Amino acid sequence: MKKEFIFLGPPACGKGTQTDKLAAFLNLPHIDTGSLLRNEIAKKTEEGLIAKSHIDKGQLVPIDLVASIIEKKLASDECKNGYVLDGYPRSLEQAEKLDIINANIDINSNVDFKAIYFEIDTQILIDRIINRQSCPVCGEIYNKKYKPSKFENLCDKCNVALKTRDDDTEEIAKKRFETYYEQTAPLVDFYKDKNVLYRIDANGTIEEVWTRLLDVINL
Ligand code: AMP
């Protein structure tokens, strides 16, 4: 059975950490649209330049740009056993596009599709965002307050300087929350109506949320 997971939840709700763990646990590719777009920006491609102008304002990047990146990935051999998709879909239009992509690639497969919704108290999230750091080499995510690296600003695994995302400022974070509530939150009902929505209490430690996630995926 092919396993397909998508994740819903506000910025910094812990999706990145948990989806990374889940992909490793199930031996599936972790496809994170935010990181794919940041790679395009780092490579200074035309797509990267367009993406940056939206990311810097806390807005969604145009659907055609994101959908074409996602479509190529999901149709690739890497995803033949399924995928853990993080950061897509983020609007009803993107969810409808994902249905079309899946219908094309899953013609001959039995699929177990789950939409996992991380429910969390939003007050702590801005604080999480402005303290977030990640390793530019291995992608490990840290937080100066909640999950500090052993040595300040250095990755525990790679020993290189940690980076802060350009859009992790308070001002852009507030705009990202507005975008989330306007465009992404309605997807909870979209997937609930299809009977594929699973809710997780995302408050608590990484291990507590991980245990809840395992309970849900074993259903
Ligand atoms: P993230 O790393 O998931 O927080 O995404 C960072 C930023 O990348 C978002 O604020 C958006 O500007 C952009 N982005 C990521 N995924 C998408 C998507 N599915 N559709 C449009 N824009 C996206």
Image (cartoon, rainbow, N blue to C red):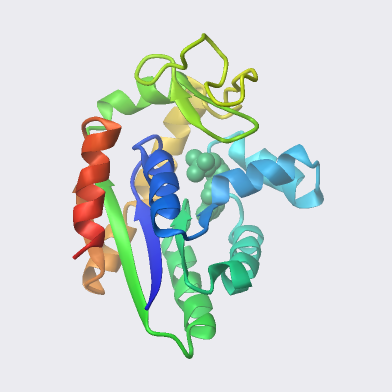
Kindly identify the residue that appears in the image at 40 percent across and 45 percent down.
21
> Which residue is at the front of the view, 171 or 142?
142
Q: Is residue 89 visible?
A: no
> Which residue is at the front of the view, 46 or 132?
132
Q: Is residue 21 above or below residue 102?
A: above
The percent coordinates of residue 102 (x first, y second) are 48, 77
Q: Is residue 94 above or below residue 170?
A: below
Question: Which residue occupies the extreme top position in the image?
Answer: 152
The percent coordinates of residue 138 (x first, y second) are 59, 35
> Which residue is at the front of the view, 207 or 181?
207
Apparent side of residue 114 relative to residue 54 in the rendered image (left or right): left
Q: Is residue 47 visible?
A: yes
Which quadrant of the structure image shows residue 193?
A: bottom left
Kindly identify the residue that appears in the image at 76 percent across and 43 percent down.
49
Which quadrant of the structure image shows residue 70?
A: bottom right
Question: Which residue occupies the extreme bottom position in the image?
Answer: 108
